[in-house]
Amino acid sequence: MNCTKCSEILDEYLAGTLKPELSAQLIQHLNHCQRCYDLYHLLSHTQELIKEEKNYSVNPFLTERIMSQLEHQHSDYSENRLIQLVHKVARPALIAASMILAVFTGIAAGNLTVRLIKPNLPAELILINDNEIEATYNYLND
Ligand SMILES: [Zn+2]
């Protein structure tokens, strides 16, 4: 028997469904071939582990403990979600309000400064930028 044939029939041997004459040949090969013996050992050990896994019984209260912890986490999650929602809405609104307040404060301060410097000008002329007018005038004369 060669290694290829051995690996093909190893599952049947481990399941106990292999014909006796082939089993004898297989055992003879396993006694002489270390590689196939290692494969046989690995497969038989794997089958034992699977059998043990099938016989393993679960603690009957495990499901209840897991479900109660999940419900507890779900209620914590709901509270956290409300706090997160407040943070998501309140923080941007506060930032936007403070930015708007800063812009209008700057405009008001600028208008106050201009009115203090040029008290006799009408309101429309106060908003004109003198630097731009002067620059345009110089450009047109050149
Ligand atoms: Zn072999």
Image (spheres, rainbow, N blue to C red):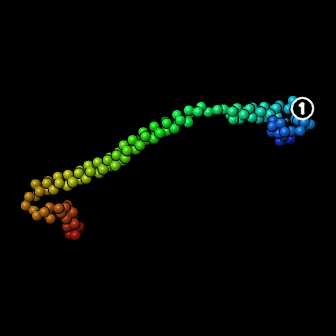
Identify the residue at image location x=32%, y=46%: 91
Residue at the limit of the structure toward the front, as seen here: 60
Residue at the limit of the structure toward the right, as seen here: 21
Using the image as rendered, state which of residue 26 and residue 48 is in the foreground.
48
Identify the residue at image location x=78%, y=31%: 41
Using the image as rendered, state which of residue 30 and residue 13 is in the foreground.
13
Q: Quadrant of residue 127?
A: bottom left
Whole-percent x, y for residue 95 in the image: 30, 48
Q: Residues within 10 Å of mark 1 (few under 14, many from 20)?
A: few
Q: Is residue 137 above or below residue 62?
A: below
Ligand 1: quadrant of the figure: top right
Q: Is residue 39 above or below residue 141?
A: above
The residue that label 1 is drawn on is 28
Q: Secondary structure at mark 1?
A: helix
Position of the C terminus by quadrant:
bottom left
Whole-percent x, y for residue 59 in the image: 59, 31
- What amino acid is found at the position of numbered circle 1 in the picture? Gln
Q: Is 73 left or right of 82, judged from the image as shown?
A: right
Q: Quadrant of residue 16?
A: top right
Whole-percent x, y for residue 122 in the image: 10, 64
